[in-house]
Image (cartoon, helix red, strand yellow):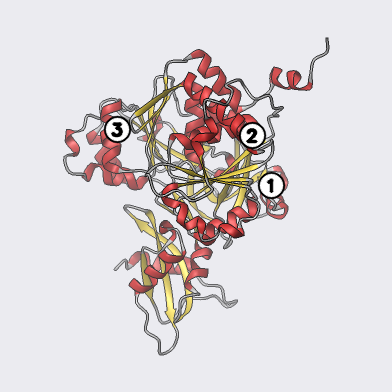
Amino acid sequence: MGITPYEMNVLRRASIGDMLVRTAQRYPQKAAFIFRDQRIDFREFNARVNRCAHGLKKLGVEKGDRAAILSHNCDQFLTFWWALMKLGAIITPLNFMFKAEEIRYIITHSEPTVFFVEDSLVQGVLEIKESLTSVRHFGYINLSSKDKPEGWMNIEALWSRDHPEDEPEVEIDADDPATLLYTSGTESLPKGVLSSHLNFYIDVMCAVADLGVQRSDVVIAGIPFYHVAAMYLCVSFICIGATSVLEYAPNPREILELTAREKVTLWVWPPSLYAVLPHLPDFEKYDLSSLRTCIVFGALSAPEVLRQWERLLPDVGFMNYYGQTEMSPLGTSLPPEEFSLRPTSIGRAHTMLNLKVFDPNDRELPPGEVGELVARGPSIMLGYYKDEENTQKAFRSGWHHTGDLVRMDEDGFVYFVDRKKDIIKSGGENVSSREVEAVLYRYPGIADAAVIGLPDPYWSEAVTAVVVPMPGREITAQEIIAFCKQELAPYKAPKRVVIMDSLPRNPSGKILKSLLRKQLGANPS
């Protein structure tokens, strides 16, 4: 009797959905995740995911289809995502802070066949629903008991007990895409990063080898699931058999409460949260003794913040982490044993990556020289969706070009210097300066504008708008910030506006942002 194509495929494939099957077999009664008042073990989670996969198939979702979701963190998000991976379909998660036009662009570009929206966010989508022509089925996620839109399905109907719990039979290859995440570049429009099942397989290996994740770990999954860092952690924890405590959105008080109650062992947060947590009222009453490791990502923490944590939790190991959506998001990490020796380093290359530093002509630079960080390895994205030009540009010379300027010492430790392009890293999120500038130019009375990031103890970098008014026009910082918040997700809106008579430019007319950073950094008032 011959072997079918599916049997041959499933025999030795690298599919992330299969990893959940194995974890459910090894640790069936262990908690996969905890959310609000429910605990779901791995066996029930796998069964629910399978029912959801069959429910999606009934809607017509097939391998290669895109499926969008707009929601805060919740168990429904995880079930939907893992079901899509078992079908070979591709999830496109949207930032829950996006406004209507930001949503419209991503849905139009990615062309999903289904779109599920958290109930409290439905109204913003209804405004543009008729223009989202690729979407055949709209659904809602019931998290706050808001009024439900007529004709929209409840996402939980996808995993009705009427659907079978057997594994869906779909041929999936290692290089089949699994996620389509939109990340800000310097362009005004975001690029879609297409990542594969193999990319996430490699994530799991590096979580063990480079981050020291263990099956006994408990992590707070508070980083929004639209963010690649959250997806990396989620996949790794489920595949290893650790437990995730889901948080609807990062909440400092709740982080302390959950850590104490659930005996959390691992924190992964941007510097802004580490800066604010010790200053919460009654901080000292929370038992944080279960913590083993604290990972800092997005930027380096301020030295005074690190010194404070060393006093508070002297036995906890701190790590720096650097990654990119395009690398799933691998890059470098600085382990606890090196942290006190090199606190300003972002660490060494992850196990599955080869990193070098190139000059503008793609020639390798010697140790200590500043250049662009480039990478090779199986965690590199498939490419930018529908954007061959930028894919080829990023992959030139057979290396992924990060666009980040670094220096690497003789021992392979990497030190972040600056961004080749004007990306601002604020509160763990990337903000495109050009996107914000485009909005500023729409504000009546602004003649010239530049957006830069300035050091900030909370945001790491505060989005700062420097504007020049039109002659005879009066503009105020408060009105400009309010205007931007109407047009952009809140984290993209300027935290500060500086009004000047003119902007410094070079002879060719280019705004000298480096000079602005120097001037305003020295005069923060």
Query: Is residue 75 shown above or below 305?
Result: above
Q: Residue furthest front?
A: 150
Q: Quadrant where the C terminus lies?
A: bottom left
To which residue does mark 2 refer?
A: 58
Query: Is residue 467 shown above or below 387?
Result: below
Q: Quadrant where the N terminus lies?
A: top right
- Are circles 1 and 2 on residues that touch, CB within 8 Å? no
Residue 58, x across and y down, in percent: 64, 34
The residue carrying pointer 3 sits among few (fewer than 14), some (14 to 19) or many (20 or more) residues within 10 Å by Cα, namely some
Residue 518 in view: yes
Residue occupying image coordinates x 37% and y 68%: 482
Q: Residue furthest bottom?
A: 472
Identify the secondary structure beneath mark 2: helix
Q: Residue furthest right?
A: 1
Q: Is residue 159 left or right of residue 485?
A: right
Q: Amino acid at mark 2?
A: Lys
Examine the image and state in which quarter residue 180 appears: top right
Query: Residue 395, labelled with which disc?
Result: 1
Query: Is residue 513 shown above or below 239?
Result: below
Residue 181, x across and y down, in percent: 57, 46
- Are circles 3 and 1 on residues that touch, CB within 8 Å? no
How far apart are the two marked residues, 3 and 1, measured between alpha carbons? 42 Å
Residue occupying image coordinates x 60% and y 20%: 166
Q: Amino acid at mark 3?
A: Leu
State which tag comes first along the sequence, 3 or 2: 2
To which residue does mark 3 refer?
A: 258
Identify the secondary structure beneath mark 1: loop
